Image (spheres, grey):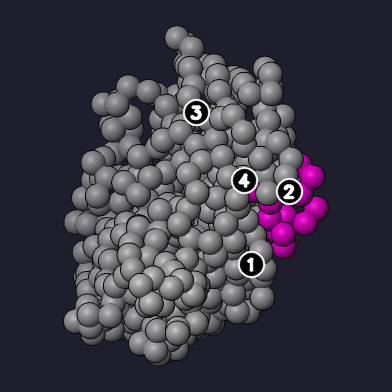
């Protein structure tokens, strides 16, 4: 028998029958730095915990739609300033305590606090007060109308946490989801088990193990040997045709919210000169990066916005591959002989492989890069928090996150009051056509400022055992949602 099977020695007409398999081992390339989704920017945390262990008042579906989560329904006042949420009955945390309106108040006030470590505090910036009307009712009052509130509350950064779990949440998370945290073997795996007191439909899986395999060669070997049942966001796209032609496997190809960018430190000389940033953009051949690093898996982008979004504006014509124009711009900026800067790369294949290609393209126009490969925790410390970098490559997989450009303290250091005003007006606007106009203005503004070099929209491919069903193909948020996953035989 294989290592996964739960065996039942049932004698049916003299024949031994094997019970349905109910455990799953799924691999990820990145290991979370810790397990608190409300105090870090690492997408790997949500990949393991979103919708599995932690839940919010609302949640994302695979299509990117927002549906009720811990709130069964809500009412919005005529002036758009008051949202009254009704919580579901019978919701308990994994420690057995009831989840009530007071826990929602605690979670949001913690996220909104001045000393909060929440990576997406902007999600809560229009919230004035959060009140527990009664144990099952929460009232959120806004300082101004916010057409994105229900969307914002579906993020992993807005999940509801147990107050008594905060001291140990980074190593022992306690949520309300269908799976509870069981074990973390650091450097290897995280195991979740089914929570039998879950308020909703029980998942088919009784146990799920997330195994961390950073090396693409090791990923291929583990999948081919069937040591793992699935690999989410498989890191070696050159192997996908082989898996697709093997009847043991299935390949799920989808889109993500991941704008993959060459991040530029806008506060560091000479990168604080828009002509230098524009030169970098013209030096890059996006398609060569997509073909060389991703084996064609990716869609070119000219701004920080997903092409599958109906409000996307195609601005690729602002930064075509033009090395001669790049050299002219560098000369205009006083760098006719080029310059040297750092290129710090996190572990994902798109960054490591793409970094080598982009370094070569920049060298052709006179820009030398000192490449440093960082582990994920190092990248978060040096680049994201410490801003100790010149260039980096990262995919921003949060949904609809163009508002990060309105945060001067964000790691790439873009400070434009006009853009910040556009985001403020967007937040206060609920009329769809007006929101579309503002989003178009925002996209063009950051593209024309060449804040970063926009590379491609990250595709996602999951390789799985052919008998597994219910895995998401698309990634509207950073999640490996296991709630509907099951074995077909």
* Residue 416 visible (yes or no): no
How far is mark 1 from mark 2, CA to CA? 23 Å
The label on residue 33 is 1
Residue 164 counted in the magenta span: yes
Nearer-the-camera pick, 350 or 269: 350
Question: Secondary structure beneath disc 1?
Answer: loop
Residue at the image point whose x is 22% and y is 74% from the top = 296
In screen coordinates, is 100 left or right of 289? right
Q: Quadrant of residue 310?
A: top left
Residue at the image point whose x is 50% and y is 37% from the top = 69
Q: For the view shown, which residue lies furthest in the front direction?
A: 13
Q: Residues within 10 Å of mark 4 (few under 14, many from 20)?
A: some
Q: Residues within 10 Å of mark 3 (few under 14, many from 20)?
A: some
Tag 4 residue: 197
Q: Which of the two labelled residues, at mark 1 and mark 3, occupies the earlier sequence position?
A: 1
How far is mark 4 from mark 3, CA to CA? 18 Å
Residue 408 counted in the magenta span: no
Q: Which of the two labelled residues, at mark 2 and mark 4, occupies the earlier sequence position?
A: 2
Mark nearest the camera among 1 and 3 is 3
Question: Secondary structure beneath disc 2?
Answer: loop
The label on residue 95 is 2
Q: Which residues are magenta?
A: 163-175
The label on residue 441 is none
Q: Which of the two labelled residues, at mark 3 and mark 2, occupies the earlier sequence position?
A: 3
The label on residue 72 is 3
Residue at the image point whose x is 60% and y is 52% from the top = 195
- Relative to 144, is 257 above or below? below
């Amino acid at each position: 028998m294989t290592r996964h099977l739960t065996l039942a020695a049932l004698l049916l007409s003299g024949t031994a029958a094997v019970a349905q398999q109910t455990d799953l081992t799924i691999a990820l390339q990145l290991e979370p730095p810790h397990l608190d989704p409300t105090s870090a920017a690492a997408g790997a945390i949500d990949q393991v915990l979103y919708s599995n262990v932690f839940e919010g008042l609302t949640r994302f579906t695979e299509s990117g739609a927002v549906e009720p989560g811990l709130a069964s329904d809500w009412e919005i006042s005529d002036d758009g300033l008051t949202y009254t949420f009704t919580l579901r009955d019978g919701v308990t945390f994994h420690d057995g305590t009831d989840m009530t309106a007071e826990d929602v108040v605690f979670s949001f006030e913690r996220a909104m606090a001045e000393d909060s470590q929440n990576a997406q505090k902007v999600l809560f910036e229009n919230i004035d007060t959060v009140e527990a009307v009664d144990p099952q009712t929460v009232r959120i009052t806004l300082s101004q109308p916010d057409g994105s509130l229900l969307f914002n509350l579906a993020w992993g950064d807005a999940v509801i946490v147990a107050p008594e779990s905060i001291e140990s949440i980074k190593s022992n998370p306690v949520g309300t989801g269908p799976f509870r945290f069981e074990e973390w073997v650091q450097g290897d795996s995280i195991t979740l088990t089914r929570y039998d007191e879950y308020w909703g439909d029980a998942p088919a899986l009784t146990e799920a193990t997330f195994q961390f395999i950073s090396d693409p060669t090791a990923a291929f070997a583990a999948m081919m040997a069937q040591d793992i049942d699935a690999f989410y966001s498989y890191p070696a796209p050159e192997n996908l045709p082989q898996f697709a032609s093997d009847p043991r496997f299935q390949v799920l190809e989808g889109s993500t919210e991941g704008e993959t960018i060459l991040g530029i430190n806008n506060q560091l000389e000479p990168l604080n000169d828009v002509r230098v940033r524009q030169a970098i953009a013209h030096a890059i051949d996006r398609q060569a990066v997509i073909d060389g690093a991703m084996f064609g898996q990716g869609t070119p982008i000219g701004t920080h916005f997903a092409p599958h979004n109906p409000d996307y504006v195609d601005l690729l014509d602002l930064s075509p591959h033009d090395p001669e124009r790049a050299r002219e711009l560098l000369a205009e900026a006083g760098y006719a002989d080029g310059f040297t800067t750092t290129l710090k790369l996190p572990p994902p294949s798109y960054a490591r492989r793409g970094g080598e290609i982009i370094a070569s393209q920049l060298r052709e126009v006179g820009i030398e890069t000192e490449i440093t490969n960082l582990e994920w925790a190092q990248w978060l410390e040096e680049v994201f928090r410490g801003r100790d970098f010149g260039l980096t490559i990262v995919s921003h997989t949060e949904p609809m996150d163009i508002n990060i450009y309105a945060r001067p303290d964000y790691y790439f250091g873009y400070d434009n009051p006009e853009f910040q005003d556009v985001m403020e007006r967007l937040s206060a606007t609920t009329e769809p056509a007006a929101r579309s106009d503002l989003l178009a203005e925002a996209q063009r503004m950051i593209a024309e400022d060449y804040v970063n070099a926009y590379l491609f929209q990250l595709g996602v491919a999951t390789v799985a055992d052919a008998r597994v069903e219910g895995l998401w193909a698309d990634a509207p948020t950073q999640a490996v949602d296991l709630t509907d996953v099951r074995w077909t035989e």
